[in-house]
Image: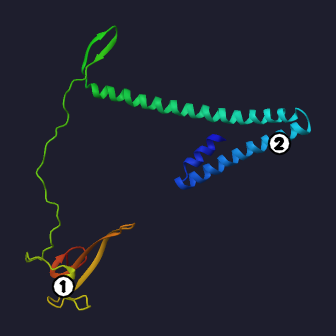
Amino acid sequence: MVRCASIWVAGLPPTQAAGQTAKMTSAATIGILIDIVISVVLTLAAEGAGLFYLAARLAKYGKIILNAVTGFVKAVFNIIKGFMGYVSKYVAVAARGAVSATNQGVAQLRFDGKRNTTVRTSKRLDDAASQSRTHDGKSAAAAQDTCVNGCPVSMVTGEELLTLTDGQLDGLLPFEWTRLYRTSAVETDSRLGYGWSH
């Protein structure tokens, strides 16, 4: 029963797991306290009956706790056993066949200092964003610099303008990736239809 309860709690989201664990712990604590109060009342009412009742109840709780502790220790040993299996696999790979002479039937592994990785500096790359360009090679005007007078058409070039949000991060500091698409070249198809570019 304890194993089923622990598997059920492990499958819950962290906030619900904390609440359910607190409920189960408080229920067990209150159950023990009620048993102690009943045993005190039985001891006062009928001499010695409370001690037998308390001993029977503690034996029940002791069995549950013993099973839980035994299950925990077995789980820890299974984890350690699995880990040691991975360690033995790693040793076989890390040795790379560097086995020297055997000493009384035990192979001596030699781990030499062979370097498998190198550290070097690479040339620094500029990761700053660059202004988008038109098909003529000129810098495209930013959305806020384009004269539109409340209309989605540039008053200077006559291009239609479309601002789309490509991605968005919500949270305390929201962030949006937006792109301005324009109808600058009829022959270009950028998956928005012919004439749209960014």
Q: Which residue is drawn at 72% across and 47% down?
A: 30
Pointer 1 residue: 146
Q: Is residue 173 left or right of residue 81?
A: left
- Helix, strand or loop at mark 1: loop
> Identity of the amino acid at label 1?
Thr
- For the residues labelled 2 and 1, the Cα–Cα distance comes to 83 Å
- Helix, strand or loop at mark 2: helix
- Pick out the residue farthest to the right: 46
Q: Which residue is drawn at 34% across and 7% down?
A: 104
**Is residue 7 in view from this perspective?**
yes
Up-down relation of residue 21 to residue 60 (above or below): below
Pointer 2 residue: 38
Up-down relation of residue 117 to residue 188 (above or below): above
Q: Which residue is drawn at 18% across and 79% down?
A: 142
Up-down relation of residue 37 to residue 130 (above or below): above
Q: Which residue is drawn at 39% across and 31% down?
A: 86
Colour scheme: rainbow
Residue 115: x and y in percent read 18, 31
Query: Pointer 2: residues within 10 angstroms few (<14), some, or many (20+)?
Result: some
**Numbered disc in front, either 2 or 1:** 2
Quarter containing the C terminus: bottom left
For the residue pair 143 and 97, the one nearer the viewer reads as: 143
